[in-house]
Image: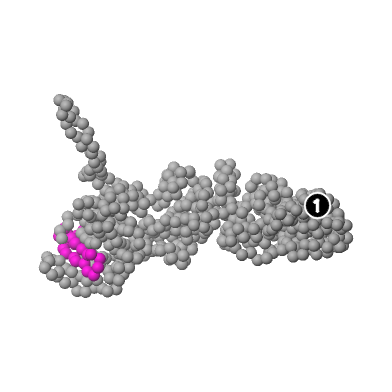
Amino acid sequence: MSEATQAEGLNPELKKHTFEAEVAQLLHLVTHSLYSNADIFVRELVSNASDACDKLRFEATNDDSLYEDDGELKIRIAVDEAAKTITFTDNGIGMNETDAIENLGTIAKSGTKAFLDKLSESQKQDGQLIGQFGVGFYSGFIVADTISVESRKAGEPADKGVRWVSDGTGSFTVETINKDTRGTAITLHLKEEYSEGEDNYLDRGKIKRLVNKYSDHISLPIQMRKEIWQEDVKEDENDSSDDQVPAGGEMVLTDEWETINKASALWTRSSSEIEDDEYVDFYKNISYDMTDPLAWTHNRVEGRVQYTQLLYIPEKAPADLYTREQQHGLKLYVKRVFIMDEAEQLLPMYLRFVKGVIDSADLPLNVSRELLQESRDVKSIRDGNARRILTLLASLANSEDSDKQEKFAKFYAEFGDVIKEGLGEDAGNQERIAKLLRYATSTQDGLETSFEDYKARMKDGQKAIYYLTADNLAAAKNSPQLELFKKKGIEVILMTGRVDEWAMNFLTSFDETPLQNIAKGAVDLGDLQDEAEKAEAEKAEETLKPVVDKLKTALGERAKDVKVSTRLVDSPACLVVGEGELSPQMIQMLQQMGQDVPASKPTLEVNPDHPLIKKLEGSKQFDDLAQVIFDQALLADGGQLEDPAAYLKRVNELLMR
């Protein structure tokens, strides 16, 4: 900062100061890059005013005289359409000339940071809600060509007030003034483009909406002059009475100040003091969802990272839940200052349906989406949010209360497929997620069976959790792959969700019990299959070897291999893929998503006891029958025929013979 100089031709008390080159560059960055949204100036100036009041409240704990017989802290916003100005006034700690030069004249210096540095270690916790002052002030230059600040520090005489004025370019002026009241008044002289049209900040309704959006949570009352409707009247010339007739009217300002914010952030209050109706109303306000939330959790987290979380689970899934362009995330606040909507970095993708608010005590006020992606503190918050939601869901799922059980059933019907994505995305919480999953089984149709339930019902000697993936429940229940398991009374989990097969690639066991897809690889029932059955299978394989070899030749490149099956009872054949290979359904899904899928050929397994397979050996239509058997097995497995017309032609010819 250069030495103060007397402004030419101006009041001798007026001193002109020049910004250092580095500070001027920072100012240009702030006003043109950091704050790309012009509305932000309302948030910043209200936040600064709130900080000033917080400082006074803290200082006054040791010196009550600083209140100067005015202990009702408040913020006022006044709009002057004629002068094209907006003024933000607070009765907080205020500034003297030195404070104004240091805090407003140097972006790199934070008045609040210096204030906090003076606190002893025992006092720092008490001052934790006091935000930073400095950079945010300059956001006013987005909409104003000149900013004037009038202030007086609490406890100092009236003639020690200060006026600070700048056009935000290279310099500012400072002069001493008389100011009867403590605190600060910041007046923005609006640029022409911001005093008319859509970007008219002289519109009181617009200012109120911005306060409600960005600063409704400020614990101090934010006030504007009240407007009332005043009707114009005129005398009725044809009426001799004293009655008057309305003739239109207009909104007029009164001298009464009204509070335009709620003056209390819901999430800053103790959960024991908040009624359910308040939680529900707040959810509807932030989510634009007219239905009540299914459940919520409200906590203050303390540790290396301190933050408050208020998280909601909706009752209904949004229509765009599976759309790539879907906007999601939580509202982010820093020390009760609104930072951004839809901060997606605060939640893992598989919890993108969660709504709510995070209020951090540690993140910087000028945090950007890029910084959120790189911040270790944000990762800690994201992990904490995930654990909290999964804990909430577990409390619903495991509750003996029928209402909570019903809530979990509703949740799973709407978001069950989404939560499964977490098996592949969140290794740290994989076990928590697996415990929440519910499926139908070969013995129960409803989505009610958990892995824990299944394990409790496993047969003696059963070494694995068996499951089968399919497009829908009917296809799963009628799958040839189930036949042996039905015969032996072995329950199989039926997975029919859109992401099941993908998700199960990441979950290989549950509670130390391996999971086995019965449509992949060889079926090994271990102790559940006796020696006689194994011997019979080996004999059938030897007997049918000529037919198997002939099938391999007839199918050529369509099949990876042909084997005698040990899993079929009623069906002639089925398709099996190797462990780690893609099923026909998975290949189809990936192709529909436009992804390149590596070539994968299934193995055809044939039932040696089925009449159609026995008929093959001496059939003159062997090749056609082989193709039809393969195609039917493909259809039963949920795959699609490459040439449906050729299949129909073969079937018709066989029927006519």
Name the spot of residue 133 as percent of width and height, x first: 31, 62
Q: Nearer the viewer, residue 403 or 325?
A: 325
Relative depth, front residue between 554 and 154: 554
Question: Residue 126, percent across and down?
Answer: 35, 59
Q: Is residue 583 above or below residue 271?
A: below
Horizontal side of residue 207 vs 547, given as left or right: left
Residue drawn where x is 74% and y is 59% of the image: 576
Provide the residue designation for mark 1: 654
Quarter of the image with the N terminus is bottom left
Would you say residue 554 sits in the magenta stretch?
Answer: no
Q: Is residue 498 above or below residue 104?
A: above
Q: Position of residue 171 (x, y in %)?
A: 22, 69
Residue sitting at the far top: 240
* 551 or 165, nearer to the observer: 551
Residue at (80, 52) in percent of width and height: 654
Label 1 Cα neighbours within 10 Å, binned few <14 / some 14-19 / many ≥20: few
Q: How many marks?
A: 1
| Residue at 27 percent of width and 69 percent of height | 106
Residue 362 appears in the figure? yes
Question: In this rendering, would 231 be left or right of 400?
Answer: left
Report the colour scheme: one colour
Under mark 1, the amino acid is Leu
Q: Which residues are magenta?
A: 155-176
Which quadrant of the view contains residue 589? bottom right
In the rendered view, does 129 fall on the left or right side of 228?
A: right
Q: Is residue 518 visible?
A: no
Residue 65 in picture, x, y percent from top left? 23, 55
Local secondary structure at mark 1: helix
Residue located 21% across and 44% down the image: 255
